[in-house]
Amino acid sequence: MTLASLPLTLVALQVVTGIALGAIYVLVGIGLSLIFGLMNIVNFAHGAFFMAGAYVGVFLYGYTGNFWVSLVVAPVAIGLLGLAVERVLIRPLYGRGPDDPLLLTFGLAYVVVESVRILFGLTGLPFSAPPPLRGAVDIGIGYFPLYRLFLIGFVGLVVLGLWLLIERTRFGLIIRAGARDPQIVQVLGIDIGRVWLAVFGLGCALAGLAGILAAPLQGVTPEMGVPVLAEAFVVTVVGGMGSLAGAVLAGLLVGIVVAMTSLIAPDLTKMAIFAVMALVLLVRPRGLLGRAGAFG
Amino acid sequence: MSGSAAGPARAVPSSEGSGAPGGRLARAGRHRVALSLAALALFPLVAPYEALAVNILVLGLYALGFNLLFGYAGLLSFGHAAFLGAGAYGCGIAIVQYGLHPLAAIGLGTGLAVAVAAAMGYLAIRTRGIYFAMTTLALSMCVYYAFYRAERLTGGENGLRGINVPALGLPGVSLPLLDPTVKYYVVLVFVGAAIWLFSRILASPFGAVLEAIRENEGRAEACGYDVRRVKLVAFVISGAFCGLAGALQAIHLSIVPIETMHYATSGEAVMMALLGGTRTFFGPFVGAATFLLLQDGLATLTSHWQLLVGAIFIAFVLFLPLGLWGEVLARLRRLDAAPGGAP
Amino acid sequence: MTLGFDRRRLLTGGAAAAGLALAAPALLRHARAEGTGPIRIGFPVPLTGPFGAEANDQVRAAQIAVKEFNAAGGLGGRLAEILVRDDKLNPGEAATRTLELIEKDKVNVLVGGLSAAVTLSINNVARGRGVIYNSISQSDAITEAKDFGRTTFHEALSPHMTAGAVGRYVFPRHGKRVAFLTADYAYGHEMVRGFRRAGAAFGIEVVSDVRHPIGATDYSAFLPMIASLRPDVLCLCNFGRDQVVSVQQATEFGLKQSTKLVAPVLLLTARKAGGEAFEGVVGGTSYYWGLEETVPSARAFNDKFRAAYGGAVPSDYGALGYAGVRSVLEAAKLAGSVETDRLVPALEALRADFYKGPQYFRTCDHQSVQSVLIVESKFRNQRTPDDLFSIVHAEAPDEAGLRSCAELGHRQG
């Protein structure tokens, strides 16, 4: 099958599908990229935080019946977890080189996943989109699930907010400066440790938010973070480690590539992600928008 | 990402061999191959069962090969599963589909790993740091899917079955591999030869160049070394060791699961090397033993073993930053250097 | 010779004394005679990983079979025990654990496995060492001549017979325009083959056969195209988590309005994890506890399970744990021995009704010939939390639903 032989509306619909897919990649990718860009930490527990966010959200929904509460509380809870992890576990490793945090977060991922298994069981919890967001609407090129449209819009708003935070606030200025040269920032009298703490918490909160947003698409299981971690790595690396715009661009690119491959050669979908990553890195060894130590 | 030579984790003299001249530890380090082999020869006596002991041998060799690149050349690869897998599939396919002699099959598997490593290395060495890690990961996953889809040869998702080698026929003698003890020592002969070779490589001028590149790439380049070529050669040699490990694993388990090539298996090499200590010669074996014994032991205790494994990992990172073996050596070195020394 | 060399090294080594002390148990364990002591059944199952719930249920059910056997006096006083090992759903780990069970624990037989790759791995190690292995995981490949060994038995349904039975039920009732969404691996392909064979008799028209990568987390990219073809039936030829997510997303994309969703192997745990989205989904299974309304042996088995585990009912795969162990133990009684050479013909001769009605192993490929249940998922009209399916049909045991011995590459008919 080739693209040309398919009806145009189906191809267009597939692009929208790809953007919805990409929205989740963008959120997890940004969190991972933030943490790496500023702290030089490859966070292997990112997928576990994503999963934990979904569980917290679904669990709360069971009590409150209100999806909006979950949407706010889940990222906050995972953000707080992130703060605690940074304080207690990551902080002792500063100055040791990047292998140690990598190994530590690898172990942490095990702990988080297994804790969820103990607390919530092995099988996973069912979860569907909240009633007002169910069903499909006509978007001119065909019917599309309402929840996925909501997802695209919501993630768009979050990304806009992050951009404003990084480009337009004093905190953002410190982040950008810290990514470029942490020592200078410290010399200027800014406690870089507190910035790192905040950034780690923010990155984890974004992972948690992505988790609860993804929950209505696939239900929740303790293992749901595993493929997400790999996809998030691809997104961050393709976009350029530490680049917000890069993560957004790469997230959407990966989403659309997945959607298009599904249409033309469905069995190659998973391979396509890695093929894209290899190609991009061979042509641009620092990713699409990556610069040394820059954030912006 | 491994270019930074600053932090305390970097300040350790590498390998047992190069300690202070004249110290007992340095003298022992000169016999590192013999000591390693002795430890591995005795290992089955304390291992819970032979099949696990062989796994530790094989994955120890895998981590050792990986560590040539990581510990000695300072290059973090996340794609070494491709070489372990290429070695395993190469060996397995040679036996199952073409009925070759196991020795020829092991050679073929290692050769296939070398070829895959040469191709991957050629593409990957143009990137650096975390991008190098991710490029190797991406390329290895492309190799993974290529093998996955070659279902007629590899068995695809179901894995390759039927690598049944009941005995290793040599001129004049047939070694019964169905006997687990015999199998262990046969595998040890291969692993031992590899350890010896590995030690020779490190002791050669090439080994010195590798460490020079790790410590300061720019200076090595200025000294007239073709850094790219050295890296590529190191990548291929590292792949060869991992390929041999894969070939031995195929014969040991009589199957090759597709998981062998997955990036999670690449991650295991990183973890085992770090657990044992990347700046030590024997560390990867200690790391493999720790990793596998922990998993095995805890899994028999509780189905929530992953919680404990994770917690132990965290504790290791926090409290034993040099890795288990690295920490042991550092303590010994301190004792050795202390005035009067320990008896 | 290697061994001599290493022994010398051992003696010269400083740790020789300690080494020898440690060696003693190892030597003893090799000296242990076979054929005496309890009957040992190795039971590798994936206690960790996504099928942990099934695996735990399998262990519990298997223990009932052992308890029953021992309470009845065992094999002339020789009692049975089961050695559970966690294969972590990983074929390499499964091979290692199987080696442990055979070489160190000296098990008499093996029962277990969940997932095709793992069951094939256990089987390859076991057949290379002449140990009987009764597989309780669905696979077509394991009964093909290439993987089959004299000691291989397959207690579970095969994907071919399950998909075939589901197809024969669904196609005449729900329509002939059929789409497949298939996990791209042997197990998925095997189910498609089963559907296509069964469908030929009804003249089905396959409008789409989409292959998705195994373990995909999103099916949205496949669904608009399938929806645009307006099939009568959509067969989701995948398993576990893939099944849950694809059913959930097919529902989200509104496919249920005009299309019947069919999942050939409809897992009880998948229905639990999928919840409301599964309502109305039809599929096949080897066992559902509701069978007790029509089959007395099912009631007896359920009652034993309820009594042992606080009123819980056994799951589909759990029941297979019971059947797998019970078959072996009943055959041992028949043979008066657990020696492989006597147990194999006894298993071949076994005619049983343990828990779901009559079943037996076909001689050529040792596939268990048994009924296939067709179930439909419930949600709104559940009477109890365990009331998850209604049995809409039961296809009686029939070798016609299996691939022929010749097709599998076996000589005998």
Image (cartoon, coloured by chain):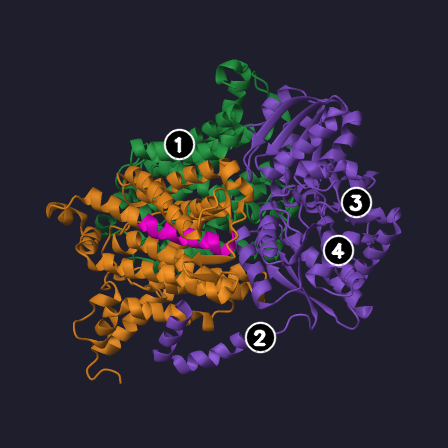
Label 3 chain ID: C
Estimate the spatial distance between the alpha carbons at disc 1 and disc 4, rounded to whole Å: 55 Å
Label 4 chain ID: C
Label 1 chain ID: A
Q: Please state the horizontal and vertical placement of residue C341, each as a whole percent of the image.
A: 70, 60
Name the secondary structure under disc 4.
helix
Q: Main secondary structure of the magenta part?
A: helix
The range drawn in magenta is B238-254
**Which amino acid type corresponds to the residue marked 1 in the rendered image?**
Val
The residue identified by callout 3 is C370
C208 displayed left or right of B142:
right
Q: Please state the horizontal and vertical placement of residue B82, each as a whole percent of the image.
A: 40, 45
Q: Relative to the observer, which residue lies in front, A217 or C158?
A: C158
The residue identified by callout 1 is A276
In the image, residue C280 above or below residue C145: above
Q: Please state the horizontal and vertical placement of residue C195, each as a whole percent of the image.
A: 70, 31
**In the picture, which chain is purple?**
C
Q: Are marks 1 and 3 on the same chain?
A: no
**Which amino acid type corresponds to the residue marked 4 in the rendered image?**
Pro
Q: Residues within 10 Å of mark 2 (few under 14, many from 20)?
A: few
The residue identified by callout 2 is C31
**Which amino acid type corresponds to the residue marked 3 in the rendered image?**
Gln
**In the picture, which chain is orange?**
B
Check if mark 2's residue and mark 1's residue have beta carbons within 8 Å: no
Q: Residue at x 34, y 79 (%)?
A: C12
